[in-house]
Amino acid sequence: MNDQQIYKLIKAEEIRQLEGLELIPSENYVSKDVMRALGSVFTNKYSEGYPGRRYYGGQENTDQLETIAIERAKKLFRVDHANVQSHSGAPANEAVYHAWLDPGDKVLAMELSHGGHLTHGAPVTILAKQYQFIRYGMKDIETGEIDYDNIRELALKHRPKIILAGFSAYPRNLDYKKFVEIGNEVGAVLVADMAHIAGLIAAGVLDNPLDYGFHVMTATSHKTLRGPRGGLILTQGNVGNPLKQVEKTIENLPTLIDRMVFPGMQGGPHMNVIAAKAVAFGEASTPEYKIYAQQVLNNAKELSIQLMNRGFKLITNGTDNHLMLVDIFKSFGIDGDQAEKTLDKVGLNVNKNAIAFDTLPPFKPSGIRLGTPALTTRGLKQKDMETIAQWMLDAIENRDNTSRLEAISKEVKEFASSFPPPTTK
Ligand code: DSN
């Protein structure tokens, strides 16, 4: 590579990833094949439109490519239609809202601090200016049980046009059946934002909301799905005649969403990313991937136990999925930012995170969020979770002891380097 300035940074990042342990639950390591597809000549091509109906010539390969990606996604999630062009999870959610809602319409979604996402109506987003978001949350942080009675009450009172189930920081399973019952009672479109757990759903180790009657599921391809950074929208219904106007009906959601992604919100799709998505979907349909996904859950369960044994107070006292949220302030009297920075010093990467009913501000919240998708890709098993929990405790207890932190960092580096990410092997 001629650009030495950038080359050096790529190499430095490779080393950072090799020598550290990634515990941020939304991150993962792609395979060599995904990376190869991402860095392929498809990056040179404009393909505005959809397979068979593009605005540019020269689409004999891109049409096949996108069709393969769509078909693989449909099979993986047992769904009528897939849009693989959405650039990421946030625009995927936005496309669904814009396809179905009119300005001022209501959406019932999870409160950010209870585990929801910014795109679920956080006041700082443009979405919150366009639509009215009504928020639900957990009954309490000990069990983590969602307050379904309250969701029903809110749904009956506000008659939202969309009810959204999904999260980016909630460690328990959702009761999809209850959401569908409430949604059907009030005639709302049911949307599942499965960005975090799409890979676990694809592998069949967690339930698929589409099997319960959800109309739409959005996802990212880069978290547990272990593909390139990107979005995915899966929809039940008919893909209508592209040349005809379609009515705004639930049956027509696939067409309405396709049209909102392009030309509604985006121009040319990133065909190199779609190539890499297709590879990731292929990988996610293998028996090896199912074993990986189960191991993610086993590792998360074990890590949660090892952390709790060491005095880490977990929101909901455990996890059913790949992630956990620690009330680090209650556990050790430091805020999430201090914990994140301390753990970064020893090569254990987590992210600070607000917790429900947080009394601290967003940049210094009470929590940290961590999980096991990336560790599991590196080949770590349950026995390694005890080692990680002990390093975390050691680092936090010795946060002002530079030489102890250096010693832990050395141990982490040696250990991590013996489990290289797939693209570094
Ligand atoms: N930023 C992602 C996460 O970390 O959960 C969600 O968009």
Image (spheres, grey):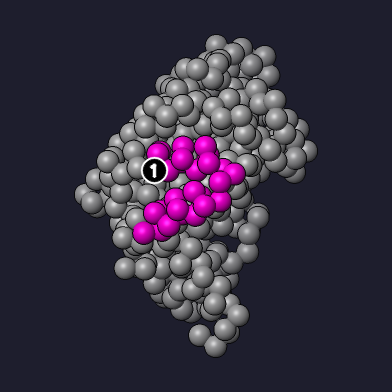
Q: Position of 297 compared to 101: left or right?
A: left
Q: Measuring from the top left, give residue 238's x and y in whole percent.
A: 45, 43
Q: Is residue 232 above or below residue 137?
A: below
Of residues 158 and 352, the one drawn nearer to the viewer in this rendering: 352
Asked if residue 147 shows in the view, the reply is yes
Residue 395 is covered by the magenta coloring: yes
Q: Position of 391 compared to 350: left or right?
A: left
Q: Is residue 137 above or below residue 361?
A: above
Task: State the quadrant of the C terminus.
Answer: bottom left
Residue at which label 1 appears? 388
Of residues 76 and 319, the one drawn nearer to the viewer in this rendering: 319
Q: Measuring from the top left, give residue 206's x and y in whole percent.
A: 34, 34
Magenta-highlighted residues: 389-414
Of residues 93 and 39, the one drawn nearer to the viewer in this rendering: 39
Q: Is residue 149 above or below residue 392?
A: above
Q: At x 37% / y 49%, what residue is drawn?
A: 375
Q: Measuring from the top left, give residue 94's x and y in whole percent.
A: 63, 45
Q: At x 46% / y 37%, what residue is drawn?
A: 393
Give residue 55's quadrant in the image: bottom right
